[in-house]
Image (tube, grey):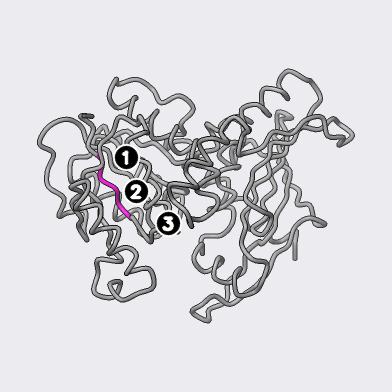
Amino acid sequence: MSNLSVVLVGCGAPLRSMGWYHATQLLNEKNDICARLDFIVEPWFMSDAGKSSPGSTEFADFQKEAEAKHGIKFFSKVEDVPPVVEGKRLAIISARTSDNPKLFASCLGIGCHAIFLEKPGAPSVAELKNMQESAKKLNVEIFMGFNKNVSKYSEKARQYASANAGTKVTFYHNNNYEDSPESLGECFERNAEGMLKNMAIHELALAVSFYNVSVETIASVEADREYSRMQTLPGPSGKEFTDFSKLKFTITTKSGDEVSIAADRCGGDDSIGLVTDKAGKELVRYTMPDPEDSAAIEDAEKRIPGAMPYFYVQDPDYFKLKQRVAQAIATGGSAEGVATIDVAVETLRVAEYLTPTLMEQLK
């Protein structure tokens, strides 16, 4: 049995929330993640207000099964998790972005040796920097859930472009929301930090990690008006939100590096690394899911029917992320390809810098 104990913070609704999917991967005995899920903290569904909210019945059923079958202990607050007795402790935080700074501080307070933080980490650069500094003072390593940093499709696209001078890479990210005001309005409200801080943050992390992109190195950014769409829509609360339902843009750095990013909330459930020549002619494309991962994806669909489609597509990458993080904690080595909080801070800086610029261009 692994000596690395995991505290999952922010389980959310079964079949819909990434925190819940982290739990299913950790509890799957076929997965060699080398980490043991011991505690789950769920602030919303275990609160008085959340106990009767949509998804609460499904969460209660999951809790009952996890307690009986796996001995998982559930809490409504991080502070209630018992202290570390032996071994090391990893916290996986997969909550609403606005709640992350407080939950992060609480995880530091219960003796976590490392934290796996879902994107984008915090609502603002200032908050994420404070989290970064707090962790450094306690020598706690922070890993980020930018799964595309370890995806086969992005790696293959980068390698092909690197080996062929004069080529250009565009990273496409598609989600499968219904193209309706109701569906997109709900999406805009639930992801109120905006597309660049949420959906497209993965691609911005690729740009920061591998294309020398930072606020200081950006020479220009240009939106593709024909592809992009910015909308103002009411969410379930009635409040209006302005965000991108589709967005494509190209970043050029002062050193001449160039990378394009495209995100479509209603475009499907795949991601693509497209390599073109100078004239824009397609040379090669790589996709996620990768054909080599089809068996793992089919297995996930059979084991857990009815979940959000992108969970299945990203299953191999999220498994790889947690496995590499767990091995790094156990050995004291590095987690190959896994983004650190330093990358996350710069990525969030770039997102905050680009959002008003791109919105202005698309008015």
Marks 1,2: beta carbons within 8 A? yes
Residue marked by disc 1: 115
**Mark nearer the viewer, 3 or 1:** 3
**Do we see residue 177 in this rendering?**
yes
Spatial CA distance of label 2 from label 3 is 12 Å
What segment carries the magenta color? 6-10
Residue for badge 3: 17
Badge 2 is on which residue?
93
Picture coordinates of residue 244 (x, y %)?
A: 66, 61
Q: Residues within 10 Å of mark 2 (few under 14, many from 20)?
A: many
Instruction: Name the quadrant of the C terminus.
Output: bottom right
Question: Could you classify mark 3 by the number of other residues whose Cα lies within 10 Å: few (under 14), some (14-19), or many (20 or more)?
Answer: some
Which of disc 1 and disc 3 is earlier in sequence?
Answer: 3
Badge 2 vs badge 3, beta-carbon distance below 8 Å: no
Find out whether residue 9 is within the magenta segment.
yes
Amino acid at dot 1: Ile
- Estimate the x, y position of residue 177 in percent, counting from the top left: 61, 62
- Report the predominant secondary structure element of the magenta stretch: strand
CA–CA distance in space, label 1 to label 2:
7 Å
